[in-house]
Image: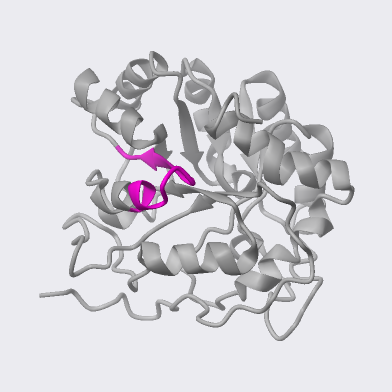
Amino acid sequence: MTAPKTPGWLDWYANPSEPKFRLPAGTVDAHCHVFGPQAEFPFAPERKYTPCDGGKDDLFALRDHLGVTRTVIVQATCHGADNSAMLDAVRAADGRARGVATVRPDVSQRELRELDAAGVRGVRFNFVKRLVDAAPHEELSTIAKKIATLGWHVVLYFESADLPELEGFFGSLPTPLVVDHLGRPDVTQPVDGPEFSRFLRFADRNDVWVKVSCPERLTVTGPPALGGERHAYRDVVPFGRRVVAEFPDRVLWGSDWPHPNLLGHMPDDGLLVDYVPQVAVTAEQQQKLLVTNPTHLYWPGTE
């Protein structure tokens, strides 16, 4: 029996527009998810939310509609440490997908090698308090040491306000770090203010890659990527643009489909593609953001 969707949850946008911005050949969507389908891949009992279904067939249809070549499928918190849905999608992509898993500290090297063979290249540590219980640093350090031998990286999801208490731990991890969604800055603060400047220093001093993703999650004043709006989320643009300018070889882009936990509005994914040239303003920046960097990180040697 399937569980009902969390009240207020918005379903993903069913008929996305055709992007005006044409993605370059080889574009990688470096941050997307699959949700179930719940009847086939049940959600974790300890989850903080119950999403709509958003399975691999829907993801692949969106990939092809937008002109994306490859995807990186990040384990969603609603599935806990059961990576079955994510792995099923990665395998079904026939080499056109990589995975980021959630694992527990007691994971064996044999299990990690099996995940690696299936296409997993990293693990995700979630520090957003409304989504997960407190993350024990000692256990996460154990996981990071285990995956370092495989050349994997750690994907970090946190709120910018929590960085001061977390950056020491992050800097101690023996792997490259990939930060979700610009480190979730407060975009009502100045882009050159102390909070975002601290994040930039953290990225500069460590082996950090940054996803310029999820403006729909960060925006306060919009306008939203709906109704044909080609210059959406103007309050987020300066933050993304600055990261792309300062770290051109360590930035990634992702759609975040099917857009977990959105309650205010659900963006048109075609218009989210049209957001890209607002933050990566030159052809060289766009090529690095969309193709060169994610290919190097997830398909090294095929650049």
User: Residue 51, located in which quarter of the rendered image?
Assistant: bottom left
**Front-most of 166 and 48?**
48
Q: Position of residue 261 (x, y in %)?
A: 44, 67
Name the residue rendered at 61%, 29% in the picture: 302
Give the quarter of the figure containing the C terminus.
Answer: top right
Residue 2 vertical placement versus 26 (above, below): below
Q: Decide which of 46, 106 is in the foreground and name it.
A: 106
List x then y, in percent, for residue 50.
Answer: 29, 68
Above or below for 172 versus 120: above
Residue found at the far left of this picture: 1
Measuring from the top left, give residue 82's x and y in whole percent.
22, 46
Q: Which residues are magenta?
A: 89-102
Residue 161 in view in this figure: yes
Q: Residue at x 34, y 63 (%)?
A: 35
View extreme (front): residue: 94
Q: For this rendering, which residue is in front, 242 or 85?
A: 85
Which residue is drawn at the image coordinates 44% and 49% (left, top)?
Answer: 73
Q: Quadrant of the N terminus?
A: bottom left
Residue 35 versus residue 75 in the image, above or below: below
291 within the magenta span: no
* Residue 65 x/y as whole percent: 59, 69
Q: Residue at x 24, y 32 (%)?
A: 104
Q: Is residue 40 shown left or right of residue 289? A: left
Q: Is residue 22 left or right of residue 144?
A: right
Is 79 located above or below residue 95 in the figure?
A: below
User: Is residue 193 visible in this depiction of the protein?
Assistant: no
